[in-house]
Image: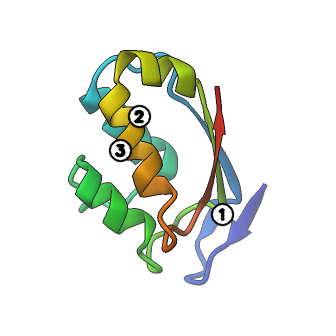
Amino acid sequence: MLENNSLGVEMKRTVEIDVSAVRTREQLHELLFIELGLPDYYGSNWDAFDECIADPEARLPERVRVLGMSNLEAILPREARLFRECATQPKAIPSFEWIP
């Protein structure tokens, strides 16, 4: 479903991201950049991700369903942990749902 954000830009309210096929840190950050529509200044690292998902000016969905987390945790445990830590921070704009 699409809706206008505070800037009047159309955006999806809920986005699903399937991380089950991700094999590298770079692939994960590229997938997040594309699927979440992160801003061009996104630096493809966890500090940048943390800043982007807390930016009230960013055009982010309200909810994000992350599919395949058990695969990501098995292949890239550190990245999976950092992803969860960033995404569950109190100032994060989207709410994340983790699907094994």
Instruction: Name above or below for residue 33 compared with residue 50.
Output: above
Classify residue 87 as left or right of residue 15: left
Q: Quadrant of the N terminus?
A: bottom right
Name the amino acid, label 2: Ala
Q: Is residue 48 visible?
A: yes
- Locate residue 27, reporting x and y percent: 32, 28
* Residue 62: image tag: 1
SS for dot 3: helix
Disc nearer the start of the sequence (3/1): 1
Against 67, residue 12 (above or below) is below
Task: Estimate the spatial distance between the alpha carbons at disc 2 and disc 1, rounded to whole Å.
Answer: 21 Å
Secondary element at tag 1: loop
Q: Which residue is mark 3?
A: 82
Out of 100 and 9, give the one closest to the viewer.
100
Q: Residues within 10 Å of mark 3 (few under 14, many from 20)?
A: some
Q: Which mark is in front, 2 or 1?
A: 2
Residue lying at 55% horizontally and 21% vertically, measured from the top left? 70
Q: Quadrant of residue 67?
A: top right
Question: Going by the image, does 67 lie left or right of 46?
Answer: right
Q: Residues within 10 Å of mark 2 (few under 14, many from 20)?
A: some
Mark before the other along the chain sequence, 2 or 1: 1
Residue positioned 34% across, 23% down in the render: 76
Give coordinates of residue 3: x percent, y percent: 73, 67
Q: Which residue is mark 2?
A: 80
Type of amino acid under label 1: Glu
Q: Amino acid at mark 3?
A: Leu
Decide which of 32, 47 is in the foreground and name it.
47
The residue that appears at 50% across and 67% down in the rendered structure is 92
Q: Return the x and y of residue 35 as percentages of the image width and height.
A: 50, 43
Tag 2 near tag 3, CB within 8 Å: yes
Where residue 51 sits: x, y (%)?
33, 67
Q: Quadrant of residue 83?
A: top left
